[in-house]
Amino acid sequence: MFTPMKVIDIDFGKGPLHPDRLDGYDTAYALLRVFGTPIGIEKLPLTNGHYDPQKLRKAILEKHAHRIIRTLVAERLKKPLDHLLTPEALFSPQEPNDSPAVSMKVTIAVCTRDRAADLDLCLGSLCRLDYPDLEVIVVDNAPATEATARLVAGRYPSVRYVREPRPGLDWARNRAIIEAQGEIIAFTDDDVVVDPHWVSALINVFAENPAAMAVTGLVLPYELETEAQWLFELYGGFNRGFDPKWVHLGKGSLKSAVKLHGGTGKFGTGANMAFRRELFERIGYFDPALDVGTATNGGGDLEMFFRVIREGYGLVYDPGAIVWHRHRREYGRLLAQLESWGTGFAAYLARCAIAYPREVGSWAKLGIWWLWWLLRRFAVVSAKPTLIPKELILQEIRGLFTGFTRYARARRKASGILRRFGTQHQGSLPKNEPSRNPQATGPKIPSTYSSPAAVRSIDLAELLQPLKGLDSYNRVRLHVTWQGRPIGNVTIRDISGTIGTDRLRREIANSMALDMFSSDQLIDKGVLWSEIVNTFFRHCLSDATMATVEKACRTRLPSDIPVSVVVSTLDRPLDLRRCLTYLSRQQTHRKVEIIVVDNNPASGMTPPVVAEFPMVVLTSETRRGLSYARNRGICASHGKIIAVTDDDAIMPEDWIENIVAPFVQKNVMIVTGNVLPAELETPAQVYFELYGGLGRGFMRMEADRDWFDGFSWKAVQTWRLGATACAAFRSDIFGHPAIGLLNEALGPGTPTGVGEDTYLFYKVLKEGYRIVYEPAAYVWHRHRRSMKALRRQIYNYSKGHVAYHLTTLFQDGDLRALSRLFYELPRYHASRIKDYLRGRLDYPVSLAFLELVGNMAGPWALWRSRKRVKRLGSTYPDTRPASHPTE
């Protein structure tokens, strides 16, 4: 179930952070930057409108620390190193210098057609750019109304309006080239909001890389308010990563261009691209038979990127040049967009096969590979539940098959448009033949690893200078020293005569960031790594800010939210009395309802115990099984939160408050807690703890859809999330059409034995919600005292484990269950046998054998249990609201 995410921008280079409240959202989709340099994306759960700095710190350490350290080192290399680095000296609080190295006149072209509302937002962001020498052109492409002209004239008088009557995005782009006065021409779309430093970042790349004729940048979502927008990001979106890419195949033979870089979509998209104006006079303009507004629906940007590379010029992808794209909000428009992706890519292949006939075989191979990749992706999506609908992939495949013939049709139509409008703007005529790049003559420079390499030296104690005179080489071997002392080597590939200082800093930092620290820091690089991140956070988050935000994140669930506690019992009056005694001592100001479900009312053993506790409600369920009993209690409850525990468990006085506390996060649907042994007096109780017990340790854990999907081929290990001897649920999930009540074919009292709780966890995660394991919420559980009872319990657990995986396989189509059943479990039992033969097994071999027998009995037990449910009937959540848990 998708809930809107707030897209935010966190820059750690601008002094201490002061996180804003983000009320109304459960999750923040955060771009993380250091001194303006993007280093990654992080999804941050929100509590009371705040993200938890400790969770951000953990995410940084686990996922983004390498880029942060490399970025900080690269930033430090802007000046000579007067001493080797330390974590404290590494962090520099100074603002980055966003001024370009040189000044070039820039023309920004926005091609649009009848989308005045989107265009208004785009032009507003262009007015906030920090670059001085700008020209902005709006090319109105075959408009049906005068709305765009009125908008530009009325609100943006400094923007030049140009009407292009020939329909098609590439006609509009070519008209912009004709009209442009800038040395650099940057293109963006009308549904884009640009970063204030966008043009400055582009110009820095052009200035640092004289051979670069094209630069692309990072495209991120402007908003994630609808499921369609989030699905587009999950599908791939426009984000091409946070590592720069330099491509320059050199002079001479370029036959490897298709094999290496035929899939030019990896370099970016037309929503964020810029070119030197002179390029178009050398290799031609955009092909008007491609892209939006034609039968091909796309491919114009991809074809231009390839033409730049194939003609021997440089192309750079720099994630520092950022724009924010407004994705399609409606699912139907998303389907159409993905179909156009397939159509446009196929048309791009067809166009390139015609333009480069000697390489037609390579283009055919690329098309086959792309189809295979889509089919493989479809198979992966079909093999396990994913958030990406298979329909999206099928739409792209459909577009791929229909697109191959569309280029010829679009080409004929473009010729007709040209005849209709005459030969005005000759520069926009398309070319079907590669031009001859005057710079691509001379000796051939192979780009293989065995090709000749230039050797240069650089000392970090001196100010970095560009490396020049590399025209005869495609790569350079760089010896890095500090005050004459060798530090390391760096190999830089895809060079183009000159390597600018920005690229030098990045390449050195990427290859040897930790090698620049003083020797006493290098004893343990793992310790150094953590120390750098901790120092980094001390600078970014002041103690006052940290305390304020952490206090907000620790806020308790409001006391006006009522809680129901469900205790199921089966003829254990002594245990039940102890459990209810401890429940009656709970220290809480909220309304608490305690419901006892008698799973054997015929015995008459439970009502006398319940009568001793006037505040306890008694209900009964004649159908045997813990799932039946708990479902009856859930349906009888009235609380917004429903906690469950066993009759043989006791709990501390703050248990209720601790188990409900994580529900302050709106997207948390289940909370589990630790289950500790109340006694270890008998061998059976000791062996049960050796088996694994019910506790899951003392470290807090959170699981969500990302965690669910993180098991790429292994089964989802929901048993790591705790047990329902100590758990609580947001009551609305039981009315969710894709979740519902506990599966009554699973669990104690049924032939399967267990699995009802892990399968409920599975369904909740599958729907995109969050589960928290909170060890501060704990109970003491009295394990089975006799070996007979323990053997029965372990046998049931082993049956239920297999039954759970078979349920995810048959009911959810999750093929990951097969790896657990036919690889992981056999391997586990084989290791047990090996340990026994070597005398290393402390666990009784009879119990280990019982686990094996129970696993083998799982399929039969599930079949019997399902027949039993058909005979006895299922419970339906009549009293639960049949709505999604969005409150």
Image: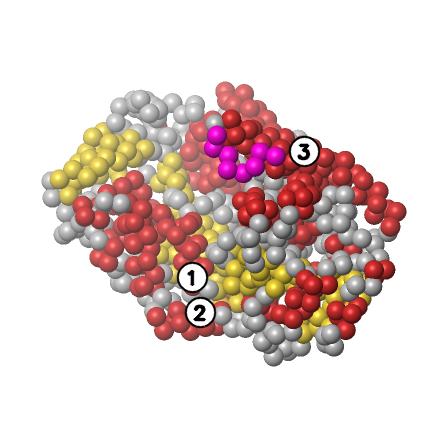
Q: Which of 579 and 129 is in front in this view?
A: 579
Relative side of 575 to 112, left or right: right
Q: Residues within 10 Å of mark 2 (few under 14, many from 20)?
A: some
- Name the residue at 71% across, 70% down: 594
User: Which element type, helix, strand or loop, lies under badge 1?
Assistant: helix
- Earlier-in-chain disc, 2 versus 3: 2
Q: Which amino acid does label 1 sit on?
A: Gln
Report x, y in % for residue 514.
26, 45
User: Which element type, helix, strand or loop, lies under badge 2?
Assistant: helix
| Residue tagged 2 | 550
Q: Residues within 10 Å of mark 1 (few under 14, many from 20)?
A: few
Residues at discs 1 and 2 in contact (Cβ within 8 Å): yes
Magenta region, main secondary structure = loop
| Residue tagged 1 | 54
Relative side of 11 to 190, left or right: left
Q: Which amino acid does label 2 sit on?
A: Glu
The label number, if any, that marks residue 853 in the structure image: 3
- The Cα atoms of the two marked residues, 1 and 2, are separated by 8 Å
